[in-house]
Amino acid sequence: DAATEARYQAEIARALNNVPGITRAYWLTRATLVVERTATDKIIWPFICGELERYPSLRTVRVQLNPRPGTDEPVRWRQCRTM
């Protein structure tokens, strides 16, 4: 149900906000998790997927990885799992 999903999303954001190299994680929509970061995606991606994998209904959400400050990296969209 919607209340459970919202609680899961809050738990994921809270956990990711404590990961070194992630400055902010928040839900843009019900299906898009935005991650502001200072670390490379190679470093933080296992932590992101580790959290999402804990919640079967959220394993396939889209993750928006914003560029690190001071870089010319593009915004990247990834998924831990597909349908």
Image (spheres, helix red, strand yellow):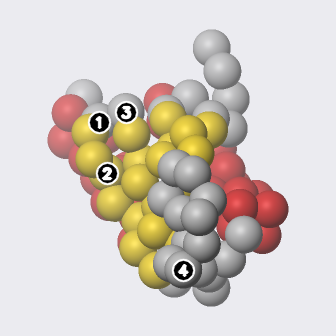
Real-space CA distance between mark 3 and mark 4, rounded to the nearest whole angstrom: 28 Å
Query: Residue at horizontal 67%, vertical 77%?
Result: 39
Disc ID at residue 31: 3
Earlier along the polypeptide chain: callout 1 or callout 4? 1
Q: Which residue is mark 2?
A: 27
Q: Is residue 49 visible?
A: yes
Earlier along the polypeptide chain: callout 2 or callout 4? 2
Q: Amino acid at mark 1?
A: Arg
Query: Residue at horizontal 19%, vertical 41%?
Result: 3
Q: Percent position (x, y) of residue 15? A: 49, 71
| Crowding at mark 4 (Cα within 10 Å: few <14, some 14-19, many 20+) | few
Q: Is residue 4 visible?
A: no
Real-space CA distance between mark 1 and mark 4, rounded to the nearest whole angstrom: 29 Å
Evaluate if marks 1 and 2 touch, with contact meaning CB atoms under 8 Å apart.
Answer: yes
Q: Which residue is mark 1?
A: 30
Closest to the observer, 35 or 60: 35
Disc ID at residue 1: none
| Crowding at mark 3 (Cα within 10 Å: few <14, some 14-19, many 20+) | few
Evaluate if marks 1 and 4 touch, with contact meaning CB atoms under 8 Å apart.
Answer: no
| Crowding at mark 1 (Cα within 10 Å: few <14, some 14-19, many 20+) | few
Question: Would residue 81 be found to the left or right of residue 13 on screen?
Answer: right
Evaluate if marks 1 and 3 touch, with contact meaning CB atoms under 8 Å apart.
Answer: yes
Evaluate if marks 2 and 4 touch, with contact meaning CB atoms under 8 Å apart.
Answer: no
Q: Amino acid at mark 4?
A: Gly
Task: Give the structural element (helix, strand or loop) at label 3.
Answer: loop
Position of residue 72 relative to residue 5, above or below, is below
